Structures are given as C-alpha cells and as structure tokens.
Image (cartoon, grey):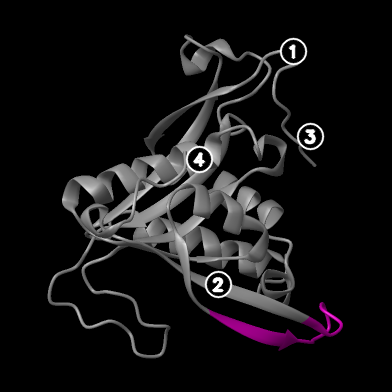
Amino acid sequence: MAAKPQAPANVKPAFKLLPLTAEDAHRCVDIYFAAFQNPHSLACWPRVPSIRAFWEHMILDELAEPGAHWLKAVVTSPGASTNDVPDLNTAQRIAGFCKWVAPKPGQVPDTTLPQWPAEADDLEIVATDPAYQGQGAGSQILRWGTERADADDVEAYLEAAPDAVRLYEKSGFREAGRTDTYIENERVKGEWYRNLYMLRPRRDTRKGEPQR
C-alpha cells in the first residue's frame, strides 16, 4: 500500500493548475475517496475494486465531454517548476482536482435533480487530498472557475457538504436550497446527512464583491 503523500517538510506548498489527463484518473479516485468521508459518500460508494473501476471509467469517459474543464492542482514549491518537489512522485503531486462544466445553451436541465439556471457554470466535482486541505489548492481551483464565470457573466452552481460551505461562501456562493436525508445501510448505521445547493450570482447582480 502506497504511503500517504505529505507536503515537503518546512516548505509551504504552492499549486499550479494543469489540465487533467487520462493517466491521472487512478490518483483522482484516491483523492475522492479520501476527501469524502461523509455518510452519503460512504453509503453510496463502498471502497471496493468495482466501485473504483466505475469512477476511473467515468472520469476517462467524461474527460472529453463538451464544455467540461477537468483540472488538477499540482504541488510545486514557490517560484519553482513542478519537477522541483523530489519527495513526491508524479501522481502524488496532484493535491486536488475538479470538473467545471460551462453553460450549455438550449439544454433542458434534468428535472430529477434540484433545478439550477441553464446558463450557469456548474462545479460538478472538486476534491482535495486531506494532506493538502486548508493550504490553498481548493481555493485556487474555485478561483479559476469563478473568474471564468465572471468573464462570461454567468452564475455558478455547486452542491456542497456542510463542512465545505465556508470555503464556497468565501468565493461568493450562497445557499439556495438543501435536502436532509436519513442514511442507513450496512456501511452507515443511521445518520442524517445535509446536502446544500449553492449559487454564485452573476457579477452585476451581486451586492458588493465576494470575500476573498
């Protein structure tokens, strides 16, 4: 079993956003499973080989999806290239990843899901390795998408677990709805889970700039 990646000692990591590639899929599933330990994820996605294979194939299938932007936050040292972190191999230098989906004009939203504006950017997935949480990788990923949304003059949408709300609020997202679900199966022994739906208004409709 591979050792858990750690940031280099006495060096605050910096991150560079790069396009995600097919070779990154395995590492992304590692990060996703490590980052999401809430009752919903544990109940729906048992950490078994078949589920891992499902997630890897999903990422590979959706890398070329029209309008989708898959990014990875790669660990580097301040002012250095990504090759200047010798303690981490190529896969371990991926601290987090995301999938931003651009607006799809004319597409009818799936009515089985909570509705959001058809013209909104959608942050479909974002995950940061716990070893790097709180060090800026997630904020950098969010900043990439929110700056693009502002440039395109569109809203942005995401779904959030309660422990991630503060990060999203700092980027200008606000709660637009929520669902509470009681989860119980062989992996989760009866827990309530709250899922929040968050919107970031268009720049010209916001009252003041979001906190940074």
Horizontal and vertical percent position of residue 189: 87, 82
Q: Earlier in the sequence, mark 4 or mark 2?
A: 4
Residue at image mark 2:
196
Q: Residue at x 42, y 83 (%)?
A: 114
Please report the bounds of the magenta region as a residue range: 178-191
Against 212, residue 34 (above or below) is below
The image position of residue 161, as x and y in percent, is 62, 65
> In the rendering, at what x and y percent does residue 143 appear?
40, 41
Which residue bears the numbered disc 1?
Answer: 10
Picture disc at residue 203: none
Q: Disc 4 designates what residue?
A: 139
The correct choice, above or below, for 186 with respect to 8 in the image is below
Q: Residues within 10 Å of mark 1 (few under 14, many from 20)?
A: few
Q: Which numbered disc, 1 or 2, marks the residue that appears first in the sequence?
A: 1
User: Mark 1 or mark 4: which is in front?
Assistant: 4
- Mark 4: which amino acid? Ser
